[in-house]
C-alpha cells in the first residue's frame, strides 16, 4: 500500500522532464555513443551526444554507466493465477488476460533484471492453448493497467511432447482413473490443429453469409456464437498472433504447412530448439523464432538443441529473439544474449537485438518499444557495466518514463521492510497465544507445513512489497530446465 | 592473414599428437595463486607444470604455442555435477543419479559414469577440466522425493572427482571417493514455483513431516553409531569377522579421510549438519546452501567449507530481497567460509563461470570469484597440490582464452588436461557446422 502511494507520488514528480546524462547509450537501432536521453510525458523526445536540457528537468547522471532499451521477454508465465486449461485439446476460449495477478513478486524481480515488457502466454498442455497477453511491468498498478495497450492479442499453440503427454499413459499417469486425452502423437497434434481450423473456416463462412444477407436487408438467423472458434477466426483474419511452442524440425515444418494451407501466418515459433535445422523454411514463411540461449537435454525433443540455434537462424534471415519461460531466467536475459556472441559469433548489437527490438517486432510493438529512439516509450534500463558483461547489474529501470526499479532505493528500504516483517510476525505470535486461537487459519497444519524446517519465519502475512501468493500453481506445464514438469 | 596464422597455431597441437610437453608463451598468465604475469610463459613437461615466468626457454623439440594477446588460466572445476550419470533428465532409463534406500555409502558414482556422455565434451568446451560427480536424489530420474513420499534418502554414495577426459572412467579418475554425499534430514519446505516439488507433498501434514524428520535423524545417528561399532570390532581383529560393505564404506569418513558432502539448504539444516559432524568428529562440506544466516560463524570456527549451487536462482521466499541468491556467495566470503561453485545439474554445467561472475557483480571480489571455480575447489576436494592454479609441480590443466573466462562472450581457444590437448569439438559444434552449411 505504502509502496503504491510512493509510486503515485513518484509519478507526479516525474511529470517533469527527465534527462539521463553522460551514459553510454546503446540505442540498438541507431548506434552506440556517449550521450543523453530526454524523457517527457513518458516518451523519449530527444536522443544524442548533445541534447537541449529542458528547464526544470530532473537530471539523472549516468556517467560511466550504460543505458539500453527495456528488455522484452517474448515468452513468460509470470503474473498469472492460471497457466494451462489442459482438459481439452483446443482451449482457444480461455485467456490469460482474465487471470492476471498484478501482485506477483516476479514482476518486481523481472524489473530488477531490466525487463519492461513480457509476452505472457498460456501453457503448452494442449495443441491449441489459450489467448495470450502482452504486459508492461508496471509494478504497483492494477491488472488492467499492466496490459500493453494496443498490443495485438495472441494465442498459444503447442506441438510435440507436451500436448501429446495427456494421451500417453506411460510414466505420467497418476492413477488408473486418469482419462486419456487425444492426441497421443505428433500425427494427432497436426490433426487437432487442422480440425480446429476446418471448423473455424466453416464458422467463418456462416458468419460471412449471415453478414452479407443482413447487409442486403434480407432476413437471416445469426449463427450460434462459438467462443472457441471466434479466436481461431481472428487468427484466420490476421487479428490474432499465433505463438507456437515447438521443438523438433518435423513439427515446425508441419505447423508452417498447416498455416500455409489455411492461409494464416505463424507469428512466432516458441522455443523452436531445432529451428536451426529448418531456418530456411521458417524465414520463407516469415515466422519469428523465440528461443532459449542454451537449454538442452532436459527431454528427448531437446536433445538436439544447441546454443548456436539463435545465431544460425539470424544468419539465415529469421527474426530471432531470446526468451525466458522462467521467472528466474527472465532476470538475466542480457547474460543470455551475451552467449550468442560466444556461440555463433553475433555482434554486440545483434546480441542486444535478440532481447529488445527483435521481440518488439515479433509482437508488433516496435513502434512503441525495443530501441532508444525519439517518439518511443521511455522504457529504459541503466546498467552499471555493459549489459553484455556477466559482471553487469541493473541500477534503474524506467517504464513510460517512470522509475519502477531503483537498486539504491531497494537497498535503502530493506531495513524498514525487515522491521515491518518482524512486527507482523510478532502480531501473528500474539494472535496464536490468544485463547481459541486453535481455530484461526494461521494454526492450520497446512500453514505450518508450508514453512520449511519447521520454523515460522515467512509463514506470516508478508510485508507490503511482497504480499503475494505463490505465483504459479504447481502442476502447470511449461518448460523446467532439468526438472520434469509435474503433471 | 593474422587469423590464418592463429588457426595454424591453434591446430599445431593436433599435429603434434598426444605429446604432453609444451611451452605456451607471450600470453597473460593468470596463476590464481599469485598475481598475473604479462607476456608470460608456462612450461609443461610430462603433463606437469615445470616453469612459469618470462621468456622461458623450451628444451629442444618441445612444442611451442605462441599465444600473444591470449590469456592462460587454470582449467575450471565444477564441484557438483551428474556428468555421465544422467543424459536426458526426463528419461528414467538414461538417469543413474540416485539409488533406493536411506543409507548407501557403498555406492560409487564413478563406476556408473558414462565416459561417452554428450555432456562431457559440451561442458569441457567451456574450460571446465574437472568435475565432481555427485550421486544424489532418490530412485534416479527426478532427483527428489517422489511417489508421494516426502522423505529424501540420507546417505547417497561416494562422489567422484574426475578429469573431463579419458577413454574410460578409470582414465578420468582423480579421486574415487572425494566425498560421501548425503542429504541432511529436513522438514520439507513448500514449493514456491514450477517444478519445485510434487503436488502430493501437500498431502502430508506438518506433524507427519516432523515425524519423518525425527525418525530420519534417529536413523542417521544410529547408522553412525553402528559404523563406529563396526570400526572397533574390525580393529580388534576377532576370529570370523564378517565384512559389511556399507559399514566398510563408512570407515574413511570416520577416519576423517573423506568428508561428508551434505545437502543442506536452510540455515537450520546447515547448523544441524555442522553440529552433527562436530559431534561425530568427521569432516563436512555443506552442499547447495540457499542461505547462511547465523551459521557462518560456526562454519568458520570449525573450518567447514561449502559448495554453493547456482547463483542465478530465484530467492527462496517471496519476501526475500530480489538479489538474495546473487549476494549469498559474498555473504559466505565475508563470513570467512571457504567455498566453491557447483551446478548440481548437467544441463547447465558449462555455465559454472557465470554463476561466479554474477556473484562478483553483487559484491564478491573478482579474484575470489575466479578462485571459487578453480583453487578453492581443488583445496576443498583435497587436491590443492595437484590442480586449481598454475604453479610448478601441478598438473597442466590449462586453458588458453581470448579474455576473462567468467564472461560469456569469451572464447576458449585451447584446453589442456595433464598437458595433453583436449578436443573442443562436441555434439553442439558438430550440429552447428552441419546445419550452418545446409544448402
Image (cartoon, coloured by chain):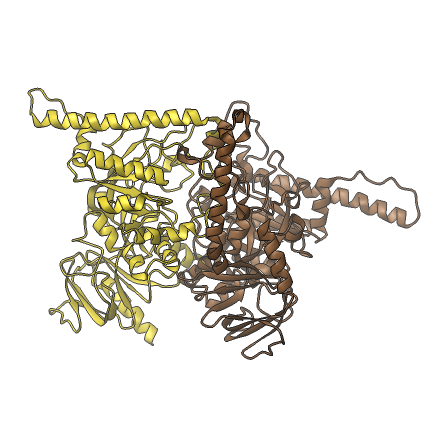
Chain colours: A brown, B yellow
> What is the residue that sits farthest to the top in this orientation?
B240
Quarter location, residue B157: top left
How far across and down, in percent of the image, does residue B23 sit? 18, 67
- Give the quarter of the image for residue B84: top left
Coordinates of residue A101 in the picture (x, y in percent): 60, 45
Residue depicted at 41% across the width and 63% down the height: A389
Residue B229 visible here = yes
Query: For this view, does A162 lie left or right of residue B431?
Result: right
Q: Position of residue A158 (x, y in %)?
A: 57, 44
Q: Is residue B12 left or right of residue A460?
A: left
Q: Relative to residue A111, is residue B346 depicted above or below?
A: above
Of residues A1 and A392, the one nearer the viewer is A1
The image position of residue B303, as x and y in percent, is: 22, 46
Residue lying at 86% horizontally and 49% vertically, measured from the top left: A212
Q: Residue A370, relative to residue B117: is it above or below?
A: below
Nearer to the camera, B187 or A89: B187
Residue B343 left/right relative to A11? left
Q: Can residue B148 be seen by looking at this rendering?
A: no
Amino acid at each position: 500500500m505504502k509502496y503504491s502511494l510512493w509510486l503515485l507520488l513518484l509519478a507526479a514528480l516525474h511529470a517533469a522532464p527527465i534527462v539521463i546524462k553522460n551514459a553510454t547509450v546503446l540505442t540498438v537501432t541507431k548506434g552506440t555513443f556517449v550521450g543523453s536521453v530526454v524523457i517527457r510525458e513518458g516518451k523519449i523526445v530527444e536522443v544524442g551526444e548533445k541534447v537541449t536540457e529542458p528547464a526544470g528537468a530532473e537530471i539523472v547522471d549516468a556517467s560511466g554507466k550504460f543505458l539500453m532499451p527495456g528488455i522484452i521477454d517474448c515468452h513468460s508465465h509470470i503474473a498469472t493465477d492460471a497457466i494451462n486449461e489442459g482438459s481439452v485439446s483446443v482451449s482457444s476460449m480461455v485467456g490469460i488476460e482474465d487471470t492476471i495477478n498484478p501482485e506477483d513478486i516476479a514482476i518486481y524481480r523481472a524489473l530488477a533484471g531490466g525487463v519492461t515488457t513480457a509476452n505472457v502466454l498460456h501453457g503448452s498442455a494442449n495443441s491449441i492453448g489459450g489467448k495470450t497477453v502482452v504486459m508492461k511491468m508496471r509494478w504497483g498498478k492494477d491488472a488492467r493497467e499492466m496490459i500493453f495497450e494496443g498490443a495485438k492479442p495472441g494465442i498459444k499453440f503447442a506441438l510435440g511432447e507436451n500436448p501429446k503427454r495427456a494421451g500417453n499413459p506411460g510414466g505420467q499417469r497418476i492413477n488408473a482413473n486418469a482419462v486419456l486425452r487425444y492426441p497421443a502423437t505428433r500425427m494427432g497434434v497436426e490433426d487437432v490443429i487442422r480440425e480446429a481450423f476446418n471448423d473455424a473456416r466453416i464458422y467463418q463462412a456462416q458468419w460471412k453469409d449471415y453478414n452479407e444477407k443482413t447487409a442486403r436487408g434480407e432476413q437471416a438467423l445469426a449463427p450460434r456464437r462459438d467462443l472457441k472458434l471466434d479466436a481461431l477466426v481472428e487468427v484466420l483474419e490476421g487479428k490474432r498472433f499465433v505463438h507456437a511452442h515447438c521443438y523438433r524440425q518435423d513439427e515446425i515444418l508441419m505447423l508452417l504447412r498447416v498455416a500455409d494451407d489455411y492461409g494464416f501466418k505463424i507469428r512466432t515459433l516458441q522455443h523452436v530448439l531445432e529451428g536451426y535445422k529448418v531456418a530456411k523454411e521458417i524465414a520463407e514463411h516469415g515466422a519469428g523464432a523465440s528461443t532459449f540461449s542454451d537449454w538442452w537435454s532436459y527431454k528427448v525433443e531437446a536433445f538436439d538443441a544447441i546454443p548456436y540455434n539463435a545465431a544460425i537462424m539470424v544468419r539465415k534471415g529469421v527474426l530471432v529473439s531470446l526468451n525466458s519461460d522462467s521467472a528466474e531466467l527472465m532476470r538475466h536475459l542480457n547474460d543470455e544474449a551475451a552467449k550468442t556472441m560466444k556461440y555463433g559469433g553475433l555482434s554486440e548489437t545483434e546480441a542486444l537485438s535478440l532481447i529488445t527490438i527483435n521481440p518488439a517486432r515479433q509482437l508488433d510493438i516496435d513502434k512503441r518499444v525495443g530501441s532508444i529512439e525519439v517518439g518511443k516509450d521511455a522504457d529504459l534500463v541503466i546498467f552499471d557495466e555493459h549489459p553484455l558483461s556477466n559482471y553487469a547489474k541493473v541500477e534503474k529501470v524506467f517504464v513510460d518514463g517512470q522509475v519502477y526499479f531503483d537498486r539504491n532505493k531497494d537497498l535503502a528500504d530493506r531495513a524498514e521492510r525487515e522491521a515491518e516483517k518482524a512486527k507482523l510476525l510478532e502480531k501473528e505470535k500474539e494472535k496464536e497465544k490468544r485463547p481459541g486461537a486453535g481455530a484461526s487459519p494461521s494454526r492450520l497444519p497446512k500453514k505450518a507445513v508450508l514453512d520449511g524446517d519447521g520454523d515460522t519465519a515467512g509463514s506470516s502475512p508478508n510485508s507490503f512489497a511482497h504480499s503475494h501468493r505463490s505465483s504459479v500453481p504447481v502442476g502447470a506445464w511449461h518448460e523446467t530446465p532439468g526438472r520434469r514438469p509435474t503433471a | 592473414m593474422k587469423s590464418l596464422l592463429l588457426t595454424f597455431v591453434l591446430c599445431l597441437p593436433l599435429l603434434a599428437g598426444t605429446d604432453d610437453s609444451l611451452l605456451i608463451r607471450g600470453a597473460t598468465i593468470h596463476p590464481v595463486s599469485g598475481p598475473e604475469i604479462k607476456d608470460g610463459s608456462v612450461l609443461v613437461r610430462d603433463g606437469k607444470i615445470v616453469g612459469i615466468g618470462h621468456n622461458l626457454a623450451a628444451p629442444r623439440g618441445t612444442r611451442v604455442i605462441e599465444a600473444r594477446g591470449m590469456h592462460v588460466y587454470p582449467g575450471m572445476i565444477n564441484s557438483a555435477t551428474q556428468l555421465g550419470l544422467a543424459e536426458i533428465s526426463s528419461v528414467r532409463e538414461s538417469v543413474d543419479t540416485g539409488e533406493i534406500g536411506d543409507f548407501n555409502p557403498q555406492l560409487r558414482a564413478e563406476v556408473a559414469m558414462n565416459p561417452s556422455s554428450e555432456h562431457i565434451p559440451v561442458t569441457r568446451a567451456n574450460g571446465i577440466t574437472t568435475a565432481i560427480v555427485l550421486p544424489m536424489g532418490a530412485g534416479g530420474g527426478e532427483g527428489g522425493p517422489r511417489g508421494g513420499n516426502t522423505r529424501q534418502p540420507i546417505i547417497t554414495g561416494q562422489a567422484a572427482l574426475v578429469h573431463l577426459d579419458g577413454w574410460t572412467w578409470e582414465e578420468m579418475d582423480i579421486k574415487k571417493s572425494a566425498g560421501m554425499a548425503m542429504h541432511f534430514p529436513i522438514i520439507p519446505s513448500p514449493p514456491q514455483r514450477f517444478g519445485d516439488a510434487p503436488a502430493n507433498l501437500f498431502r502430508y501434514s506438518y506433524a507427519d513431516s516432523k515425524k519423518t524428520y525425527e525418525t530420519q535423524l534417529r536413523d542417521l545417528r544410529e547408522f553412525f553409531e553402528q559404523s563406529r561399532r563396526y570400526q572397533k570390532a574390525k580393529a580388534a581383529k576377532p576370529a570370523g569377522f564378517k565384512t559389511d560393505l556399507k559399514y566398510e564404506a563408512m570407515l574413511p569418513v570416520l577416519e576423517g579421510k573423506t568428508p561428508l558432502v551434505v545437502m543442506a539448504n536452510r540455515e537450520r539444516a546447515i547448523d544441524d549438519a555442522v553440529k552433527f559432524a562436530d559431534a561425530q568428529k568427521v569432516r563436512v562440506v555443506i552442499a547447495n546452501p540457499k542461505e547462511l544466516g547465523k551459521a557462518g560463524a560456526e562454519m568458520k570456527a570449525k573450518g567447514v567449507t561449502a559448495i554453493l549451487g547456482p547463483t542465478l536462482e530465484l530467492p527462496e521466499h517471496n519476501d526475500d530481497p530480489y538479489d538474495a541468491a546473487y549476494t549469498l556467495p559474498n555473504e559466505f566470503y565475508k563470513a570467512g567460509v571457504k567455498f566453491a561453485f557447483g551446478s548440481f545439474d548437467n544441463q547447465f554445467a558449462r555455465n559454472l563461470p557465470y554463476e561466479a561472475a554474477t556473484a562478483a557483480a553483487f559484491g564478491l571480489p573478482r579474484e575470489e570469484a575466479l578462485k571459487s571455480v578453480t583453487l578453492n575447489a581443488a583445496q576443498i576436494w583435497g587436491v590443492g597440490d595437484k590442480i586449481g592454479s598454475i604453479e610448478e609441480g601441478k598438473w597442466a590443466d590449462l586453458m588458453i582464452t581470448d579474455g576473462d573466462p567468467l564472461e560469456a562472450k569469451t572464447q576458449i581457444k585451447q584446453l589442456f588436461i595433464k598437458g595433453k590437448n583436449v578436443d573442443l569439438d562436441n555434439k553442439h559444434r558438430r550440429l552447428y557446422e552441419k546445419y550452418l552449411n545446409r544448402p
